[in-house]
Image (cartoon, rainbow, N blue to C red):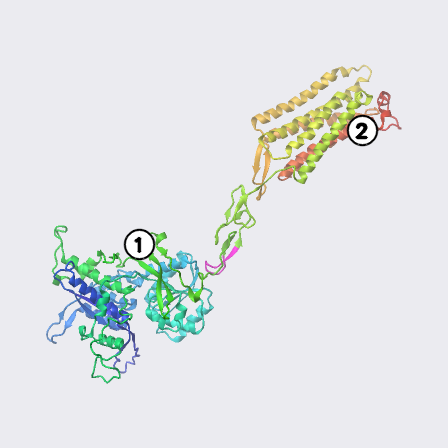
Amino acid sequence: MVIGGIFSFRTGQDYVVDTFQTLPEFRKCKNFNFREFKFAQVMIFAINEINKNPEILPNVTIGYKIYNRCGTMDILRAALALAGGTQKEISHDNCTETDTVQAILGHSGSRPTIAFAQVVGRFQIPVISHFATCACLSDRKRYPSFFRTIPSDYYQSRALAKLVKYFGWTWVGAVAVNNEYGFNGIAAFIQAAQEYGICIEYSEAFSSSDPPKRLFEITEVIRMSTSRVIVAFMTHREVKLLSTALYQQNITGLQWIGSDAWITDDSLADSRGHSLLVGSLGFTVRRAKITGLEEHLRQLHPAQFPKSQFFKNFWEEVFDCSLDETENTQTQSCSGFESLENVDSVFTDVSELRFSNNVYKSVYAVAKALDALVKCNKKLLPNENCIKPKNIQPWQVLQKLNSVNFTTAEGERVSFDSNGDSLASYELVNLQMTNKGTLTGETVGIFDASLPESHQFIMNSIPIVWSNGLEGVPVSVCSKQCAPGTQKVLSKGKPICCYDCIPCPTGEISNVTDSILCMKCPLEYWSNRERDACIPKHIEFLVYGEILGTLLAFFSLFGVLITAMTAIIFYCHKETPLVRANNSELSFLLLFSLTLCFLCSLTFIGRPTEWSCMLRHTAFGITFVLCISCVLGKTIVVLMAFRATLPGRNVMKWFGPAQQRISVLAFTAIQVLICILWLTINPPFPFMNLSLYNDRIILECNLGSVVGFWAVLGYIGLLALLCFVLAFLARSLPDNFNEAKFITFSMLIFCAVWIAFVPAYVSSPGKFTVAVEIFAILASSYGLLLCIFLPKCFILLFRPEKNTKKHIMGKSSNNDIQY
């Protein structure tokens, strides 16, 4: 059984323009590629190892056919030759003996593999690539027989997008090689980048065969861009061209992110711009060890491959000698005793076997499939037909490859999914400069697609070297980060990564960078000045410590003091005619009620509590009713006294001291009953008003029952109105000292104050509502105190000669002073 292999030992080619006037010239391959030659030797080594292993394909020997071709057309011819199985031509008359290969290994490039895998797939011959990463090859309809031991670029593209996101780069440029490998790879990267919120500033493509003008255009795009990161989905040829062009134009400071097609290529150091590539990051397949491979490579000799012209050229290149003595050459002849044992080169270096290990796994995958066909188990699968090795067909190998699942000697699992792709596992390498001036890839992390999404990307402790020797991670963003307290707003006409930072509105915060939304604070909280935290709202209520509270408390206590002084004056003159004539008992009760009125205003100042809310309104209502009841009693006394002086009238017996006390008690009892009902049904309670102001809380007393409040206030108004009407009727009584006039003035002030109180109370915000109520209490209390008692105190203190019964009972005259 034979396995075919296609490798390009020479990667360059003399391109000839066909004129169609002469026969096309033969295109010669040039430039040694020791890595491709090592791939072929790894294939031979693996086949020899399998042939020596009695546990795999016992009594069966695997052979190989390896084609060395460069250029897509020649590679396609080699694949067709392997598929056709032409061994040798006997004659023109006889048939041709065929020996079709069971599988084809190769090629290293995606473009040639795309060209022949689609054709070979029609014959159901498996094609296993170790290096063709184009995601397009996962299309089972177009490439039904394609497998690979290297992950698809689909996974690499997503891994690169995660890498860009990991380092916070949201504004990058993309450059790809102008073929399906580049287009598919960069398209998958752009799609993944958009999912992770990464924007692409530019996306360009070119190939090494493009005219220099195209390369100049791309360098100008990079020069004018603001992104500092380039994602390069290219081969080493395009990377060397681009880095050299950028180096010549002194375009530096770029962070390169590379695909596995170039990130570990040893030839990068040959370009003039290789210094720009220092610090590049990229994914490549994980390194491995192949036991015995180094001995196999170092023991190679031209005698083992006498018909291989390339091996002869390889030997002459390594030892700088000539194996062909007939050629006229200036180099010395090879002695035949040369050995690779002591030669240090890329070919003999097995310290980092990455893609070579993929070749090794490809050979073993085919061997495992063949082994499964040869070793049929009748006990486990009674209906399975055993196949003789010489009868095995490629399509049968193709079917078995779909179910291949084994672990290598190094513990690496090998299997293929439904698209022929292998498990995605990469090493993240960082290009660093060695002491010898060469570039080496240092592993700084891994990516394993088989792990959960959040654990696929893992960094190790090895420090990363950044481009241009920067100490920290380069920055590549379209807009700077929005600090906490601001929100991102997209800039018109620009990508999603370009935005403006707008401060959060009042009452909203953002406590993280690059917030797209500002969060509203809870009802009892408000945003601080920086808009990055919610702080408790300031609770506002009328307090003694502020100027307004202090003034109101002062006037309240001052009113108490004046009332007390008035009471003292009246007490000291209680036996005088003026005090006796003005019903001293009701006067003292009125002064007491006024004192309570002044004091009840203090209950409105300070932090509202459950008890203070109930006390302030009920105390206010009861004390004012008591006060107005006393004034009403004094007014009725004045009217009754005048009526009693008329002949035949004896009305004072109906409104004596006992009746006066009962009337005051009855009027007050009604208010007490209203207050009890209010407190029982729906009493006032402390309430945090959150709707009045956005930035602070007004702590106030909710009225509970609004009907109860206006019933208390309405009852006071009713008594005040009745008192005013009676006093107004008695204002022109002909006494020298007519108290009804002063009661009229006091009730006029009282009613005016409380009428003005209603609209002021309704329209005043917050704590000023309380201040308006206190002001109304104080104003009406002062009005009663001053209008009723000030004229009497003036007589008692400064006009004692008028404090006589004769003067009080006398008639008015033009010389009399009216108070």
Q: Residue at x 39, y 68 (%)?
A: 277
Q: Which mark is residue 587?
A: none
Q: Amino acid at mark 1?
A: Ser
Q: Amino acid at mark 2?
A: Pro
Outermost residue, front side: 342
Q: Is residue 385 magenta?
A: no
Circle 2 sits on which residue?
Answer: 791
Circle 1 sits on which residue?
Answer: 450
Outermost residue, right side: 815
Q: Which comes before the other along the chain, label 1 or label 2?
A: 1
Q: Describe residue 375's horizontal placement relative to residue 478 as left or right.
A: left
Nearer the observer, disc 1 or disc 2?
1
Q: Describe residue 716's horizontal placement relative to residue 47 as left or right.
A: right
Pick the front one: 162 or 587: 162
Magenta part mainly helix, strand or loop? loop
Count of marks placed on residues: 2
Q: Is residue 494 magenta?
A: yes
Above or below — where is 589 with respect to 704?
Answer: above
- Give SS at disc 1: loop
Q: Is residue 68 visible?
A: yes
Outermost residue, bottom side: 328
Q: Residue at x 26, y 76 (%)?
A: 319
Which of the 4 quarters of the picture holds residue 593? Answer: top right
Pick the front one: 644 or 369: 369
User: Which residues are drawn in magenta?
Assistant: 490-501
Pick the front one: 266 or 646: 266
